[in-house]
Image: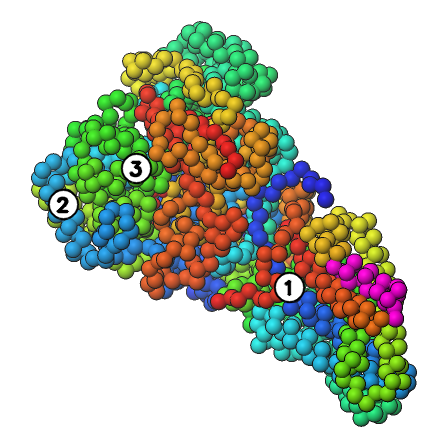
Amino acid sequence: MEIFTGEAAGAGPPKTKEDEQVAEDIRYGMVIDVRRCIGCQSCSVACKAEMSVPLEVFATWVKIVERGQYPDAQRFFLPRLCNNCENAICARNCPTKASYKRDDGVVMVDEHRCIGCKYCIASCPYDVRYINPFKNIVQKCYWCYHRLDAGLVPACVETCPTRAMIFGDLNDPKSEVSRVLATNATQVIKKDMQTEPHVFYIGADEAAMSNYEEEINYFTEPLFFPKIRL
Amino acid sequence: MRSISRRDFLKLGAASTAVLAVESQFNVIAYAAEQLIEGGRSVTRASGLPRSFLPSTCMQCPAGCGIIGYVEESRVVKIGGNTKHLSNQGALCGRGQAGINAIYDPERLLSPMKRVGPRGSDSWEQISWDQAMEEVGGSLASLKSRNPRQLLFLTDDIGDDHLGQRFTHAFGSPNIIASIGDFNANKLVADELTWGASGDMPDVANSKYILIFGANPLESNPQYLGLSRRLVQGIRDNQAKVVVFDTRLTNTSALSNELHFVNPGSLGLLILTLANVIMQEGLYKRTFIEKWTNVTPEQLAQHLAQYTPERAEAEAGVEASVIRTVATEFATTAPATTFTDQVLSNHSSGVQNERAAMLLSIITGNIDNRGGLCLPREQELAQPEPVPAPPPPSALSNPPAYPLASEQTIAGTFAQIQSREEQVGVLISHNCNPAYSNPDLGLVEDVLKDETLIPYHVAITPFLTETAALADIILPETTYLEDSDIIVKPSPELVPYVSLRQPVVPPLKEARPFFTIATELAAIIKGGMEQYFSFKRVDEYLSARIANIGGLQAAGALDYLKQHGVWYDPKSQPDYQAFKQNGFSTPSGRMEVNSERIAALGSPALPTYEPVTFMSQLGEQDYVLTIFDTAIQSDWKTGNCMWLDEILHRNPVWMNPATAEELGVEDGDEVKLTRPNNVGEAKARSVTSTVYLTEGIHPKVIAMANGVGHTAYGRIAQAEEIPYREPPDVLQNPNTEMIWWGHEEPGGNGVNPKQIVPVTLDPVGGGEAWGDMVVTVAKV
Amino acid sequence: MEQPDINVVYTVKHQLPLIMFIGQYFFYTGLSAGSFVISVIATLLGRKEFKPIGKITAILAPILLIIAPLNLIADLEQPLRFWHLMLYYNWTSPITYGSFLLTAYPIVGIIYAIMVYTDRQGPAKVLGILGIPLAISVHGYTGFILALAKARSLWNTAAMPTIFIVSAMVSGIGLVVIIAAIRYKWFDKKATPETREQDKKLILQLAQFMAYTIMLDLFLIVSDILVLLTAHTDALEAGMLILTGNFSFLFVGVEIILGALIPMILVLGPTRKSLTAAVVASILVNIGVYAMRFVMVIGGQTIPLS
Ligand SMILES: Nc1nc2c(c(=O)[nH]1)N[C@H]1C(S)=C(S)[C@@H](COP(=O)(O)OP(=O)(O)OC[C@H]3O[C@@H](n4cnc5c(=O)[nH]c(N)nc54)[C@H](O)[C@@H]3O)O[C@H]1N2
Ligand SMILES: Nc1nc2c(c(=O)[nH]1)N[C@H]1C(S)=C(S)[C@@H](COP(=O)(O)OP(=O)(O)OC[C@H]3O[C@@H](n4cnc5c(=O)[nH]c(N)nc54)[C@H](O)[C@@H]3O)O[C@H]1N2
Ligand code: SF4
Ligand code: SF4
Ligand code: SF4
Ligand code: SF4
Ligand code: SF4
Ligand SMILES: [Mo]
């Protein structure tokens, strides 16, 4: 009885001797096959649990948009998270190097070094960073680095019921991500930002990827005094 | 980098608790991870050390997925999916992961409570377990000696409460009523009539053409994760074509090839028309019909001839040409299957609707074949000896008016109690919340408040729900994460399995598992009842439940389950079309398309469209209210899970812009939905919510999400700064002070639309017909 | 802007990273830089009648520049870690240049003020010349902070640093006018009618100078907006945001009309001889520049990125 049959996002080819070789340098990447995404938000909740993300803030979420007119309306999903960019403008702009890129490409925030100037939030083109209201520092998705280090895939990837998320080493041509990238047309969000995202999408809706939404009305927020956080 | 396949991991996965503990090199943070494994493990963030874990079974919805509880310092810190579980295969939905929110709900009940004011006044005094058991046991003992048949036991919708049934039967009462009767009772009746089994299991992963009628398996389904995963496999890996008929744009339609908006309540007509086209075009499987049903193709063709595509176009609102194309494609693509759920059958013509849907699979020969509509396969369990004889049915447990229904619905129960047809001595509500989830909440509330109708109400629950708030005494039960049970469900993979629920952590404070409560009560009540609860430990009971499963016994019985969480025969393959050997479990051994049993009740013997009169004649001002489930909340118990509420906390009224224009309302306006006079009784006449404009809804339909709008159940479910008991240390969590959505504009936690839904039943199936819900809409 | 055919069913709200502490910080550094430049001009010109103004501005500049970073520190989520800025500097971050400029500039400014007050013309001139690039950088870099956050289309323009410097001059001169007028009115005890006349003339001249700077500022803003409106969609959105969107009142009404056009008319028009008009204009100018900081900092963040 064979389980885990989701071939496109599923098990790799049978193991061979060559597969045993470990590539020298790792560059992690993620492919989100939006054609498989059912908008269940399991990934969003997984992240809350895995990373103790407080209420109010999100390291990942699934944007859902509708387009078209009745009866041809259609719905599109777009899981969103930090792209762990090759050219991470957040880290480049961080004045204390609290934001930095690990050798394997994961963009980190050093909790003890971050001063909370929030310039990285202002700099990131993807709105994926947040202030942790309990720790008073900036955080984001770190691709569950602690899981990567233990040889586990990120929590959101693990929990995705339809295996819409594929994670692995971009430098290893035999890894599942590399194979999927090699055989599919992929997109990244805001390519023109030159951040070189490491999250690639397959079949994402362009309109969902644009930041089209009404402007956010912040006039109700405390703009002159910082929010008193407990 | 070596990518490890999931199959490899399964082998590796034999590494369970013991192996992991030995694997100490795992402690070393191997910075350059050379293998990435999906599922079954978790490490702490601080140290990178593996967390201890135990497999168990989820109870946040009926699907019963295999979970792994990860524990740090005897606290559940994360819930992951069990890769070995046949249904979810390592994945977990948001609700499954948010179980942590439930177990550590700051307002969880952790000691017995007794009401001090009048019922429903929400004033309680804390009492000891000894006192509680004495009081509850005392009144049950006295009822047992007076009239045991006056015990009414209301329980969950997920059909897991075997212990509750044993308790009720041992007590001497037939009156155990599960709200599972609510959700698709009519469908179960139709399935039973047609092929002698309750329910079905579409083999979607292997199908090439899938017709979905009023179901939304990518957002909600009794087998949610198992089926959504398989459906996506069917769509993407097997290139199946999917055609959805719904009144609303759903996540399922997002991944489908076609979505056709259909007039509410007219699915039955549409389906029969599809069947008619297949018959007229000669695309049916003659041999299958002749060999395996009790009708002839000619008989069927003649009966179906009345359902012309032109009529369906006029009444169901789907173009005749679309109907012809879909019918032809369905009949000429093999294998193909239909997919239905509760919604098709939640009408006063529910049984007929579901019979019609089965007809499509029957005439195309897609019955129990690979990729077709399959019989449900569920592992049978043993009854621990001695087995209490089920007392003869009562009018409450099996209302004579509905001889085909396997049991009463909760809604029907409350109506009967109110009319004083049936007397109740003691009510035990366990793991259900009818005062929130039942149609006509006003009625439920009235009954529960009336001490002449319900003299004594014992709520066995971890939470102060709307229902528990109307109890006389509350026994604080453990949540499913501290509980034990053997769980079986219809297998989406068509290979039966057994799953174990075991405590991931010990019960918090004074909470007790239902097993303990039931056993102790039986010992107090006595009168012969105690012999059925003579288990010394819960393990004894669990072992007895699986005693009949040879393969599992050989594999290590309960110990195997404790280690792996789930068991299925590893060599087993789906036994497609076993009926070819044994026939169907119907009186005739064939599929009874022509049902004498239904004819005996005055309903047409052949599947027939019976329009719901007021639905087919909607007035200008009338709209049909669709109440739908979402992927985020369970229609039932997840209201106190903050991570879910944060994503979905309100249920605005979905409205087509054309409808809004007619009504003169705009996005965000407040509107009042009022139930017109002529459609049944419900105490509340109207609910108010805000308009949410979307192009994804039929202009004659108004839709609202289920699962929000709690009026009890604590500050998280209610999104309010209600005065609450200072939580004990173990339940403290600064996040629970940050329920931001209560302060939003417009704020709050939504409304419960069920308060205006009347109790209406299918006259044949006896199941609920809340799909027949008409409202008028006005701006406030 | 016209709504494309898209309806966002679900997305999450994001925090507003920078609040008005940052806007105020920009405002104060601007005032400081503006006053310093005026002071140095006064010192360099060396004319006696400029002396009082040179002195006021020399003291104003460092004071304002000590207030300014207090705003910045107050805005930090971890204010006690402000020293990380010096210890863990990152040369690719504009904030890092800022933190060093913010240290160097007040030091120069304070020594310069001491020289001015002790009347040591030579060193004052040298320090003044040294200080001007610092002052300009200290304020220009705040423009870079915004400009280099390239995701925010309202900020990400080459004109941003220049606009910041010019608007700093505008508000700085405005402040000097106000303070000089106050001195003229109430505190100038030992003045002769003749010096009073001279002082008044000087204030009016300053006000006129301010008006010309406003023109330059307006020119920069107009060119910035023209480019926004013709560049990519996000930029267009940003342009529309301040022209017709949520921020149009603050931008068009307060920043442009109240804070630039009216003051220009006041100091160049028929009331050009009136000291009151000059003072009113200077107050308006400062309100306008404050509004500009608000529009830039807050408005720039209200364009959703996801
Ligand atoms: N994620 C998730 N999973 C769940 C649940 C949950 O709440 N969330 N609940 C669990 C439970 S208890 C149950 S019973 C099942 C329920 O699962 P389902 O039986 O699938 O029920 P719903 O999700 O309520 O409705 C399915 C679809 O029917 C459509 N519909 C409603 N009325 C009509 C109609 O008149 N005509 C047509 N054509 N379509 C109509 C609705 O728009 C909706 O999209 O799921 C279970 N699983
Ligand atoms: N109009 C209309 N009415 C409907 C529906 C509809 O679509 N439309 N849906 C119907 C359907 S499908 C269903 S299934 C019913 C649902 O109806 P119910 O089965 O009554 O579900 P809940 O109301 O959520 O009650 C479940 C309760 O279990 C308790 N609970 C939660 N977690 C735990 C735990 O871990 N352990 C224990 N022991 N208890 C726990 C909580 O108190 C929770 O409130 O509603 C039905 N009502
Ligand atoms: S868990 Fe997977 S399917 Fe669900 S929303 Fe996330 S990416 Fe999509
Ligand atoms: S997505 Fe944003 S936060 Fe993440 S690495 Fe790229 S720029 Fe930085
Ligand atoms: S908030 Fe922290 S991580 Fe972000 S830029 Fe400032 S110091 Fe760096
Ligand atoms: S990789 Fe980890 S941190 Fe990032 S979104 Fe997924 S769960 Fe969250
Ligand atoms: S589908 Fe149901 S049983 Fe499975 S994880 Fe989700 S809530 Fe739990
Ligand atoms: Mo249900």
Front disc: 3 or 2: 3
Q: Position of residue B4 (x, y in %)?
A: 52, 51
Within 10 Å of disc 1 (Cα), the crowding (few <14, some 14-19, many 20+) is many
Prevalent SS, magenta region? helix
Q: Amino acid at mark 2?
A: Ser
Q: Position of residue A209 (x, y in %)?
A: 66, 46
User: Label 3, label 1: how many angstroms apart (C-alpha)?
Assistant: 51 Å
Query: Does residue C23 appear in this view?
Result: yes
Q: Secondary structure at mark 2?
A: helix
Cβ(mark 3) to ligand 2 < 8 Å?
no
In 3D space, how far apart are the residues under numbered discs 3 and 2 (Cα atoms)? Answer: 23 Å
Determine the residue positioned at 82% across, 85% down.
C52
Name the front one of labels 3 and 1: 3
Q: Is residue B672 left or right of residue B375?
A: right
**Is the residue marked by circle 3 packed among few (<14), some (14-19), or many (20+) residues within 10 Å?**
many
Q: Which residues are magenta?
A: C254-273
B607 versus C223 height, above or below: above
Q: Mark 2 or mark 3, which is nearer the start of the sequence?
A: 2
Residue found at x 52% / y 64%: A133
* Residue A219 percent across, percent down from the top left: 62, 56
Is residue C262 part of the magenta span, yes or no? yes
Could you tell me how far apart the alpha carbons at marks 1 and 2 are, in whole angstroms?
Answer: 64 Å
Identify the residue position indicated by label 2 in the image.
Answer: B139
What residue did someone put label 3 on? B444
Residue shown at 65% from the left, 39% from the top: C6
Give left or right: position of A100 versus B214: right
Mark 2 closeness class: few <14, some 14–19, many ≥20 residues within 10 Å? some
Q: Which residue is mark 1?
A: C18
**Chain designation of label 2:** B
